[in-house]
Image (spheres, rainbow, N blue to C red):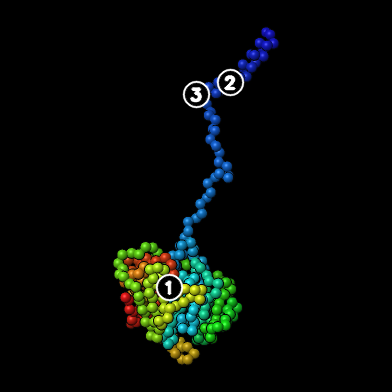
Amino acid sequence: MKKTQLLSALAALVLAPLTLAACSHGPEAKAVDRTPRATPSSATPTPPPPLQPSLLSGRMGKADGPVYAVKIDNTAKAHPQVGVTKADVVYVEQVEGGVTRLAAVYSSEYPRLVGPVRSGRISDIELLSQYGTVGLIYSGSQDRLLPKLQRADLKLVSFDANPLGYTRVSGRPMPYDVIGTFSALRERAGEVSTPTRVGYTFGAAPLGGRPATDVSVRYPFARLDAAWSAAKQRWLLSMDGVPDRAAEGGQLGPTTLVVQYADVHPSPYHDVNGVNTPMTETVGQGKALIFRDGQVYDGTWSRTSARQPTSYTMAGVPAVFAPGQVWVALIGSDRRVTVK
């Protein structure tokens, strides 16, 4: 065989399997996958987790953190109050002489400054137990009450015990001049609870309400008024006929206002002037008025034990609050409330 014929034959032997593989349609055929492969730069990014609302106030994207309560004066010399706008829930409590004091509960947001900080009361122990181990920021207490506060499930951050984190500011008369730096007071409190449940939810206004634009809640020697603002979608507050201004600007006002009727009776404690300290019972059950979206709902409240959250109904069904700050006015069962 000639050399050229030999080379041609060898070439045919090499190319034959390739030709057969390319033309075969049998079970052994393997198609070439020419689908473009994703590269890291073209891959779909992982979406961020959905925003979660605060359990206590329904504020979107404000997840609940450690819970603290601040006792804040609520008389004329204490206004304007500092840091109250950041609170999730604000309780209005009756104290000596028939006036009121605030217990502002913070979990989803914390202010830079807060106050004027005032002393704790016997009602705070039962009221705050529903939130677990709470950091209580306060200026002090009656001597006879202090052992009871120390035995309670509270992390006490007292101005009287240690002024670290507190400042007496100029321009306010004593004792309405004690302002706390929240970050320093949180550090002093140490480990506290994060809320896990409450006795209400947040959402659209349910059926069963009736129109309401103004409400007046009368304590023995104080008055809390709220006027519905459609423009601001809040109940704008006044104390004793004077608009309740925030030190940060604007008028204080929740999206949901609860009037909770409770048993208010004398306690074994007195203030420095010998005036009896009232005790507000927040374990039990009773009537409530719930105000949201320019409406009022007849409701109830119930709490079976100190460790259980307060559950509310409105118009006979579990309560649905408007997302935003909640104020709860705790008043005696015999007190007068006017709704217009």
Mark 1 and mark 3 lie on one chain; the one further toward the N terminus is 3
| Label ID, residue 17 | 2
Q: Secondary structure at mark 3?
A: loop
Residue at image point 46% right, 88% down? 270
Residue at image point 56% right, 38% down? 37
Q: Secondary structure at mark 2?
A: helix
Percent x, y of residue 6? 67, 12
Mark 2 and mark 1 lie on one chain; the one further toward the N terminus is 2
Quarter of the N terminus within the rendering: top right
Camera sees residue 280: no
Mark 1 = which residue? 253
Q: Amino acid at mark 3?
A: His
Quarter of the C terminus within the rendering: bottom left
Mark 1: few/some/many CA within 10 Å (<14, 14-19, 20+): many
The one of 93 and 217 positioned closer to us in this rendering: 217
* 1 or 3: mark nearer the eye: 1
Mark 3 = which residue? 25
The one of 196 and 151 positioned closer to us in this rendering: 196
Percent x, y of residue 223? 39, 82
Q: Amino acid at mark 2?
A: Pro
> In the rendered structure, are the residues bearing label 3 and label 2 in contact, judged by CB atoms less than 8 Å apart?
no
Mark 3: few/some/many CA within 10 Å (<14, 14-19, 20+): few
